[in-house]
Amino acid sequence: MIKVNKEDMEYQEGMTIEDILRKKKYTFRMITVIVNGRVIPKDQHSAYRIMDGDNVDVVHIMSGG
Amino acid sequence: MDLLEMKKAHKLLARMDYELGKVEKGYTNRTLYINLSDNTIKTKPVTEQMKEIFIGGRGFGLWYLWNAITEKTKWSDPENEIIISTGPIGGITQYPGAGKSLVVTLSPTTGSVMDNNTGGYFGPLLKFAGWDALEIQGKAEKDVIIYIDGNSGYVTIEEAPLEAVDSHLAAEQFTAMYADSEEDKRNVAVVSSGRGAENTLIGLLNFSFYDVKRGVPRMKQAARGGTGTVFRDKKIKAIIVKYSGVKGDTNGPADKQKIIDAGLRLHREIYELDKVQNRMREVGTAHLTEIMNDYDLLPVMNFQYGSHQDAVKLSSDVFKEYFTQGLPDGCWYGCSMACAKAVDNFELKTGPYKGQKVCVDAAEYETVAGVGANCAIFDPEYVIEANFYCDTYGMDIISTATSMAFVMECYERGIINKEITGGLEIKFGNKDAALELIHQMGNGYGFGKIVGQGVRRMKKIFAEEYGADPNLLNDIGMEVKGLECSQYVSKESLAQQGGYALANKGPQHDEAWLIFMDMVNKQIPTFEDKAQALFYFPLFRTWFGLNGLCKLPWNDIEPADNGLTDEPAKVPEHVRNYVDIFNGVTGKNITKEDIILQSERVYNFQRIFNLRMGYGTRKYDIPPYRFMGPVTKEEYESRAERYDNQLKELGYDIEGKTVEEKIKMLREYREDQYQKLCDAVYKRRGWTPDGVPTLETVKRLGIHFPDVVELISKHQ
Amino acid sequence: MKIVKTKPELCNGCGACMTACSKTRYKVEDPQKSAIRVKENSEKPGSYEIIVCNHCGECIPVCNTEAMHRARNGAVRIDDVKCVGCCICVGFCPNNAIFTHPEINEPIKCIACGACTRVCPTGAIYMEEK
């Protein structure tokens, strides 16, 4: 089990940040992904592998109207 | 009709010649007062106190209106005013989004004070013509125009019987009439409205800017709360300002380099990052449609649902095909964010201009979401057509859309029928009926006359005259304080419910948009966190309206390393830019904390203004339940898993319960949460438990004018 | 058309080009008012970078006022009457080759007049067909 924005998500072997974003339908572009307190640059999202128990925050900046 | 003939028909009512002003550190230090009842034109000085407390823009508007009216004044009384002012930063050309005009008046739909923030060239050109604000009181007998010549130095009030009222024509006619040549057209700015402003309570003002590449005047809207209805009620056909000679230093900045440096930082950021962030230059705010749909925030069918399978038909990629590309769509000089998209050569299919090819300023997110998704009409050409007519008729498209969505739901639920609608089958998804209704509203006939009064009045009419259940109407009629809601679903974000319903003028997202922070990021879990967000963000955003600024360049682009900062939601580097440009213009030395303090003064003053007009307490801050949660069975079922889980987590026993029972439980909980949110927000803002600023607060802010103290003392 | 081309390896950093440019354009000898800029490489002392507009024209469509245009001789130029000094062109220049100065309302940009090349003692800048 991992945490994504404070909510539980089933852990799957080999899952990447990109997988998580897809699964959560996080399509907004102005986001910062933080895994266990460390910012992971955008260009690593497709390769970065999540470990079981990781705490992932996908911080969306506001925008809107 | 010939322009010369139109101009010849003008009858001069009053003229004032004036010394040309000079802008010093963002101010001309005087304002222009006009009374249309007795044709007075005069100059008023801007005091240091005004600048210190109210800064400019919306602040000046509120102060003038406060002094012009009494608590008994109605929107249509002659003493009501329309005040237009940009603000000290407004008119600089080096920083994106720095040419906004702020408009303040008493609203026909809310009965209280209304503010709008719009693009177009009027505000800056007015200042460069020598005036920090234009204040219009009184009512003319026949249609008039006000003309301000900022190069020759005179102001006139003239009867103008022949020009068009509808804005796309009025802007074109007046621009051509007052420009000396094609090159001179960009120096003319027109404020106009349309026939719909006469026939509804939701009239808007169009502010023109001449697009030199397309060769047409284009328009941005001061749309909310019936400002255009007041304008037409005063019999104003247009206000025209002319000033040629805009340069990088016309705003008289104290330290121009500071402004240039900040501007270059942002230009560079937009150049490098916009294409991978929000694509504002490419598609404008239309990019939000698909985002909101993905996050279940796109209002569908009168805010019942948050997404729809057909929303893809209204996505930004679809609109991109219609937009004329490769043109710099800024609504004031220097805006590299350039979100103001346009569709050229659009052939109209309905209405009085059917068959004509027009340039439409289309389409922003609010329009697409409102007349599109919220009415379940997923047809881009219909959206563009509705956009054109709402604008040229002078009707607020947000209020039009939210009113129409409400009517459609009422029709589908059998609350109203064909007999009442005059044969209109006004169902969700019926674009022909929707366009027909827009024409009825604009032209003031049939069922359109009722819809044009807005949701609040329709609720009353449907209940009193057609026997509808007032409770249901109150739950699904998406207005607060008499203003129709803008196009975001706030149901799953308590903070945004507050962002909407606590907003001074009514539920408009320009005060606070906290949905991502709250619902998605879960950064503000406690009441105190939410209250802090509802303290900071509305104040931060108020500041744009004091200075003539646009909100978008603040957080619709972010520096590459913004995510690494302490508070990414605030975009700290851009806050630094704002401190720099304010100081660069005014020569003052404010800090980022002062930004909040400056806003806090005006924000609290506006809250107290609401109180003075008979509102401004807790009971006026409570939204209809659909802002907070599912009203109907279908709504509950559309998110059943989410709602069931929430109830279980809260310890409710939902085993074997019917949907109706679960709706009741959830409602009880959420309404209670909302009250607790109000408690926390009022406390954080320094207000009483009933939502009135305390004496201590107004003293701390320096807005303890005798009449303010007298008023709030009754509510302590 | 001929534009200013560079061979930075020949540059000795004397700055004559900047003086000549500002004098031609603004009648003062002030490198801060020059449309060509010579900068010493911070990592390699004694070697220089020369920044000057290559007249690619990417700034033309971003200009709000049509001040930025391609002149008949092919050079990209600013019409000072139309320009409102917004500096979008400066921020959107792919080569960072347009400059600003607080005393001058319009951005400072090469007009391909060649004055700088005529004073260069080393041949580090010269006029050549684009």
Image (tube, rainbow, N blue to C red):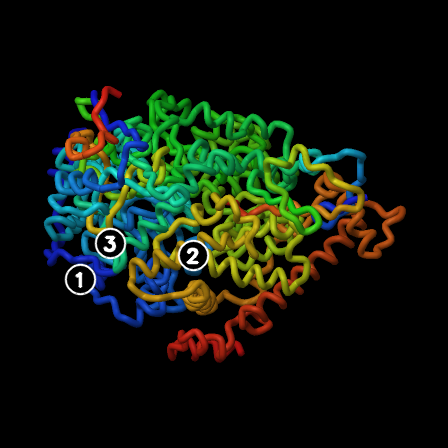
- Work out how far the residue at label 2 is from the one at label 1, CA to CA, in angstroms: 39 Å
Q: Nearer the viewer, mark 1 or mark 3?
A: 3
Give residue B42's mark. Answer: 1
- The chain that hosts pointer 3 is B
Q: Earlier in the sequence, mark 3 or mark 2?
A: 3
Q: Quadrant of residue B211?
A: top left
Give the residue number, with chain letter if any, for mark 3: B251
Residue B712 placement (x, y as % from top left): 47, 76
Give the residue number, with chain letter if any, for mark 2: B576
- Work out how far the residue at label 3 is from the one at label 2, CA to CA, in angstroms: 21 Å
At horizontal 33% and vertical 33% (from top left) the residue drawn is C62
The disc labelled 1 sits on which kind of residue? Lys
Q: Earlier in the sequence, mark 1 or mark 3?
A: 1
Decide: is B393 above or below B613.
Answer: above
- Work out how far the residue at label 1 is from the one at label 3, CA to CA, in angstroms: 23 Å
- The chain that hosts pointer 1 is B
The disc labelled 2 sits on which kind of residue? Arg
Residue B28 placement (x, y as % from top left): 21, 60
Towards the viewer: B345 or A20: A20
Decide: is B85 above or below B408.
Answer: below
Q: Quadrant of residue B420?
A: top right
Local crowd size for mark 2, using a 10 Å CA cut-off: few (<14), some (14–19), many (≥20): few
Q: Quadrant of residue B50?
A: bottom left
Tell me the element at label 1. strand
Q: Is residue C120 visible?
A: yes
Is residue B280 found left or right of B238 in the rendered image? Answer: right
Same chain under badges 3 and 2? The reply is: yes
